[in-house]
Image (cartoon, rainbow, N blue to C red):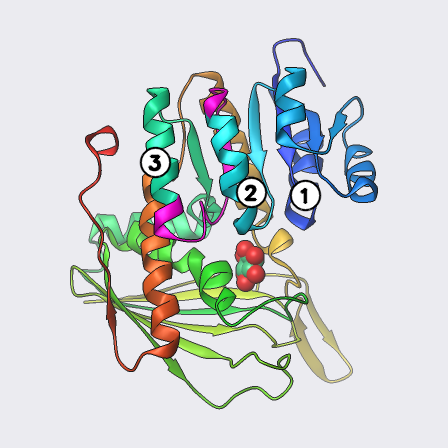
Amino acid sequence: MTTTTDLRVGVVGAGIMGADHIARITRTISGAHVSAVIEPDAGRAKSAAALAPGSAVFASIEEALEARVMDAVVIATPGRFHEPVLLPALEAGLPILCEKPLTQDPESSWRILEAEQKTGRQLIQVGFMRRFDTQYRQLKQLIDSGSAGELLMLRGVHRNPSVPDGYTQQMLITDSVVHEFDVVPWLAGSGIRSVEVRYGKRNAIAPEGLREPILVLMELENGVLVDVEMNVNVRFGYQVATEAVFQTGVARIGQPDGLQLWQDGRFGIAEHQSYTTRFEQAYDTEVQAWVDATRRGEIAGPSAWDGYKVAVACKAGVQALEATGPVELDVPEPPPFYA
Ligand code: ISE
């Protein structure tokens, strides 16, 4: 139900994630409604706006700001379009939930940090939804509690059924491993020291020009070693799973938990096909937490500084795609505003 005290949210970008957030805010989230859909593709904008009755459609963030119909903004465009939306939204003083990545390189992310500092308060929350996933949270609690001893290694798989046209080799890092670059330091309580990429046998069904799967190795500052299989043409479904190796125990998250079916002499469990269902609970919890925090004048998750650190890791990761051996990260001290 829409009320007059609701947060009026403008959603920028009406692709898969934008449409998903528009439907979520309209149907599931309390205390907010979608007042504006901002999307240059008229057909896409119209179908997305139909998900949020009463919302107005704009072709650009500037037009929507001019109309003064938003109290806050969700940015769900591809990463390369984030900076030109973030800057005017910050200048207008609007709170922002920005889908990952903050921006695509450390230089532009630094410009965003500077613009945010000028506003005098933290307005940006970055949409690293894994931090809101119940199982990731349980794993973090286990690590923090020390009840299985110290964390020694993390072993992850990140598998997609396929990738859209235009997905490039670099996007293995900047669009996909970007999630691990945020969630691993958050879980382990330690920054990333270096990133290395190893190539196995190429999957011949991958689109031309894409050399994958890859194995991404991260060494953390606290000595924890992390490996992630990044694999984007598995066809059978969407899988994100982690095994944590402790001194006296092993924990797993992300195991299949769908419908179990025994039929024709076989047994199977339904597997997710997309991140929109695998992380549905995480997105719901994330967006509700953001809306509640925004109404209190706060953020409730990864900050722009976290987004900046991930941009530094992505830069090292992209270099590691070409390099032999580990690439060290160069993260400066956080500006006092974020310390
Ligand atoms: C996509 O953009 C996402 O964010 C998904 O979570 C990730 O699994 C996928 O690899 C990306 O392309």
Any atom of ligand 1 within 8 Å of the CB at mark 1? Answer: no
Side (left or right) of 87 relative to 110: right
Q: Position of residue 59 (x, y in %)?
A: 72, 34
Residue 168, quarter of picture: bottom right
Which part of the image, by quadrant, shows the C terminus?
top left
CA distance for labels 3 and 2: 24 Å
Amino acid type at image mark 1? Asp
CB-based contact (under 8 Å), mark 2 and mark 1: yes
Label 3: few (<14), some (14–19) or many (≥20) C-alpha neighbours in 10 Å: many
Which residue in the protein does label 2 denote? 283
Q: Earlier in the sequence, mark 2 or mark 1?
A: 1
Type of the residue with mark 3: Leu
Give the vertical position of 123 relative to 40 (above or below): above
Please state the extent of the stretch shown in magenta in the rendering: 91-108
Q: Amino acid at mark 2?
A: Tyr
What residue would you read off at disc 1?
20
Whether residue 208 is in magenta: the answer is: no
Question: Under 8 Å from ligand 1: the CB of mark 3?
Answer: no
Residue 314, by quadrant, is bottom left
Horizontal side, residue 105 vs residue 330: left or right: right
**Circle 1 SS class:** helix
Q: Determine the secondary structure under disc 3.
A: helix
Q: Give coordinates of residue 114: x percent, y percent.
A: 33, 33
Q: Which residue has dot 3 on it? A: 113
Query: Vertically, is 100 above or below 155?
Result: above
Q: Marks 3 and 2: CB-CB under 8 Å?
A: no
Q: Give the percent coordinates (x, y) of residue 156.
A: 40, 68
Is the residue marked by circle 2 packed among few (<14), some (14-19), or many (20+) residues within 10 Å? many
Specify which label sits upstream in the sequence, 3 or 2: 3
Task: State which tag comes first along the sequence, 1 or 3.
Answer: 1
For ligand 1, which image quadrant applies?
Answer: bottom right
| Helix, strand or loop for disc 2 | helix
